[in-house]
Image (cartoon, rainbow, N blue to C red):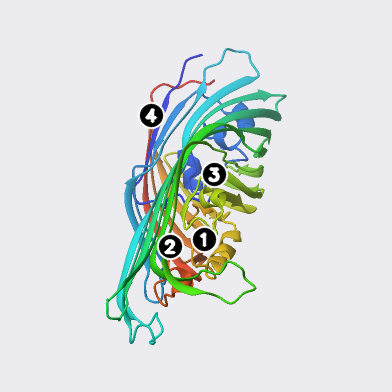
Amino acid sequence: MRFISTLAILFIFVQSFSQDTHYWTYRYGTRAVLLGGPAVGGLEDNSSVIYNPALLSLVKKTSISLNANVYQVVSITAKDGAGQGQNVTSSQFSAVPITLSGLIKKRRPSRWTFGYAIIVPTEFTFKANIRENAFKNIVADTESPGAEEYVGQFTVNTRLSENQGAFAAAFKINDHFSVGITNQFIYRSHTYAKNELSRMILNNAGASLVSTSEAQSIEYANFRYAPKIGFAFASGKWSAGLAAVLPSINLAGSGTIARDIVANNLQINLETNPTKSPILARTNFAANDRQTQLETTYQSPLSISAGIVYKGLNTLVAASAEWFGSIGLYNIMSPADKLFKRPTNLVLDGKKFLEVNASNKSVTNYAIGVEHTFTEKFNLSAGFRTNNSFYDRIYDERVTTRNRTNANTNSLNLDISSWNIYHVVLGGTFKQERRDLSIGINISWADQGSIRQFANFEQPTESTFLLGQKSQTTVDFFSYGLLLGYTLRLRSSDN
């Protein structure tokens, strides 16, 4: 038996990019990408290491594949994301992940097949800033006649990346059934920085300055393990698969959190007893903490996928679905209570001040693809898939709670995207004796999902930390891309 190497390079110049609350943004393997990703039922290539390890028993040739998504341009616009007429926009031009997969040469006869893959399941960058400068009526005229000059500013910068190494083994039970397992090791890194400030000048004799600010800085890494168990069936023109990813097991990780809240000359209620009348006075307060080398935990849920593939004389039809379970509220990092605050009786929970929360709602995604062979040298592919967000609306309730406070006492949450995305792919493959060229287009759009405002400078009040009442707004998301794929077969033989 001779060894076959296959080098496949898939360039995606303007493809839709991964979100921080989506599971199905990236698909893996040239053929699976052009079909939209329904590979759980069997496409007989290296992508089975990721989709369903049991399908490795159906792969007839040992190979190595390299898929590189090179460039992307994307734009997200949150309408009124900082108040009426204040849209928050993030536009990015960047490189996206490289994936490597292959099968290990085996000795005949053997019912075992082994494979490996290195992929990047998540790569997300979001940067936005906005500034408001206007005259607004914030303070009662008895203290400050007329409108006050006001400045509000907000910035957010987040980058999330996951790298996954997968090692798979499949056992062929008989001519129709096989089982397999993929050991998935995922390294996750996340950096997040958010800053907001507000300033106003009182119209009094001293032209007093009133200011508030909040700064957040979070950086953490986490390493976890999540095994995938697969089952496969093949008979004639049909094949089917079932796979389950078990809840992840935390292996290691550490992180740093820093947060600072300051108010100067702000009118607040000094009476801590809610049953008594408020005592309003202008005063200063501050809260600050930074903790390093904190243990981290990141959880990924149980998921179950199923797929079926029909291989006709000239047409292949593939469909699959995957259900992801929910994850209740938990802490990625749980700091100790070491909060510096002035005055010392400031009502702030020192642990919650730095806690980083996460939770996932349950979602189900679907994919369907068709491939038709017109000649021995050309086939056409089309695919569609959903990409639903697991964003938990519990965080929106926190926004409502904060609207009634003059300092943010909530634990931190780093999720940004909360919209569902739909992907359509159309492409063709031109085949030659030792190389293939794949060309396609990809279109993605959101369903006008809602998102919590990043900030609100529209009607600021002192009781809300010189910010307005944050509410829900909508997001415009659209992406299109050009897919170019190249496959070179260096040597060829059956496995």
Task: Work out whether 473 lies above or below 434.
Answer: below
Element type at mark 2: strand
Q: Position of residue 282 (x, y in %)?
A: 42, 71
How many angstroms separate mark 4 from mark 1 (CA)?
42 Å
Q: Position of residue 79 (x, y in %)?
A: 42, 70
- Looking at the rendering, which quadrant does residue 131 occupy? bottom left
Confirm whether residue 468 shows in the render: no
How many angstroms separate mark 2 from mark 1 (CA)?
9 Å
Confirm whether residue 282 shows in the render: yes
Is 63 left or right of 93, judged from the image as shown? right
Dot 1 corresponds to which residue? Answer: 419
Q: Along the polypeptide, which appears first: circle 3 or circle 4?
A: 3
Nearer to the camera, 305 or 238 = 305
Residue sitting farthest toward the left: 206
- Looking at the rendering, which quadrant does residue 208 occupy? bottom left
Tag of residue 314: 3
Task: Work out whether 288 lies above or below 457.
Answer: above
Amino acid type of the residue that numbered disc 1 sits on in the rendered structure: Trp
Dot 2 corresponds to which residue? Answer: 477
Task: Work out whether 329 lies above or below 406.
Answer: above
Q: Along the polypeptide, which appears first: circle 4 or circle 1?
A: 1
Tag of residue 434: 4
